[in-house]
Amino acid sequence: MTKVIQAHQAAALIRDGATLGACAITLSGWPEEVALAVEASFLASGHPADLTLVHSTGIGNWKDKGTNHFAHKGLIGRWVGGHTGLSPDMARMILDGEMEGHCLPQGVLCQMWREAAAHHPGVLSKIGLGTFVDPRLEGGKMNRATTRDRVKVIALEGEEWLLYPSIPVDVAIIRASTADEDGNLTMEDEGVLMEALPLAQAARNSGGIVIAQVERLVPRGSLHPKSVRVPGVLVNHLVVARPEHHWQSAGTYRNPSFSGDLRVPLEAIPELPPDERLVIARRAAMELTPGSVVNLGIGVPDGVAIVAAQEGASDLITLTTELGAIGGVPAGGRNFAMSFNADVFIEHQAMFDWYDGGGLDQAFLGAGEVDRHGNVNVSKFSGRCVGCGGFINISQATRKVVFCSSFTAGGLEVALEAGRLAIRREGRTRKFVRDVEQVTFSGAYAARTGQSVLYVSERAVFELAEGVLTLTEIAPGVDLERDVLARMDFTPAISPDLKLMPAGIFAPAWGGLRAHLETRPAMAFA
């Protein structure tokens, strides 16, 4: 009996009120063909309706694909996810209270499928303590329509932990490159492996079904058993997709360097333009330590990888992505989560096991808002739900975290002039505020755990010193009062040893990173 069905038949299998589990990032791992069919079915018949949608990462192309297909009133009743900023209509519906919305850490959600599969009570973790997912703050609730609690504080052996209860799965929608006639799945063309295996296990052990989208079907027995990522015994139905609905990422249909099939010269990676992002990336890259394992966030921080590559310093560190790529150079923008020339791919939940346990030496992350307590917000702005993604896991569990952000936003224009920074036009929005709208990173928690924390902008560098946000460097060419303190909603502590940021990073061409890093002591392994 064949497992192959049409996409509209797959949509018809999803009953009203079901819990739908997905595992994807941007469009990588996302079964777009199946999602289109679910949307078409709902618009034509009103079914399936009132679904609970659970996924760990942002899924979409910032426009009209991904989970944005589910942004119709009545289709989704409850959203539990790590990020929804890639699906603008879904984000709007959560903001407007047209569905319940819980935002939980990405690493917790991708690990939750494993716990659900084993019928464990949930994920027990310190990740999230002191942030908006802590039930003593907001409990991850993203609007007033959300009243149920999904996070609990418990005491164990005299320590505080958060318990994230398991969520049984009725329907898992997953994706692979190839399936054989028995439903065995391989992922040779995918840019990430995601958590398809534990999600499929969770669905089957919950009495649910697994629907897998693939690009090609091959005869049974023709796949190498060690290449199979999800065994056919877990897969109920296969949907063979059209190529236009099976993109490798939001920005690329297929790049063989993303799937590990070839290596590209790092010199071919486009350089950053001479603006504030280049300065931030250069100054942040100076914090790298030879031998360290590093994670880079999306946006400004991914410039650190580009600078390291252009400066010939990539070999001194090991860059990783939370999606499971180890080595190589992470891609950015619409290809976020992909990596050029990765050495190893592991599964999503396995990477967070490593991260959460202290496997990351350094992380370079973005910052939407920073406040006087050293708190950082990247998840909610003017009531708009964006989500935390893996930010909470990474920022809390890493030995040293460097937040990378422009000092102001909205129209900021700067120029690099002979080792000095010239501010041509100031940004309209302040990013250093008295109190952040939502605590995605807790400065107080970082101070209690002794974490090393820096905040790098194009004109100023701050350090969290004994729990106090402290200004330690300013850019040559800027005025402390006019360009820094007057552009903040609070007055920070100022180091008595206030320095100028290195002049070389403000030159059109730098060339000093590798020499700088080679003077730094290598990372000592515990």
Image (spheres, rainbow, N blue to C red):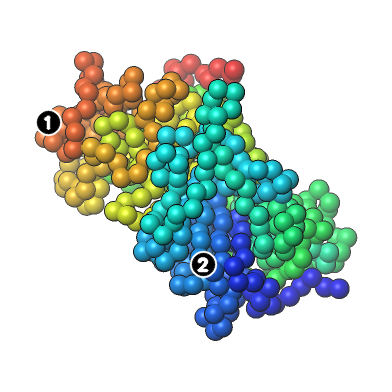
In the rendered image, residue 382, in percent from the top left (x then y), is placed at 29, 53
Q: Is residue 474 above or below residue 251?
A: above
Q: Amino acid at mark 1?
A: Glu
Residue at x 84% of width, y 51% of height:
225
Instruction: Look at the image and tell me in which quarter the C terminus lies.
Output: top right
Q: CA distance from mark 1 to mark 2?
A: 50 Å
Residue at x 53% of width, y 20% of height:
523
In the rendered image, residue 240, in percent from the top left (x then y), is placed at 70, 71
Q: Residue furthest bottom?
A: 44
Mark 1 closeness class: few <14, some 14–19, many ≥20 residues within 10 Å: few
Residue under numbered circle 1 = 481
Choose between 223 and 77: the one closer to the eye.
77
Pair 1/2: label in front: 2
Residue under numbered circle 2 = 76
Figure quadrant of residue 241:
bottom right
Figure quadrant of residue 25:
bottom right
Choose between 170 and 276: the one closer to the eye.
170
Whether residue 226 is visible to the viewer of this picture, yes or no, is yes
Q: Secondary structure at mark 1?
A: helix
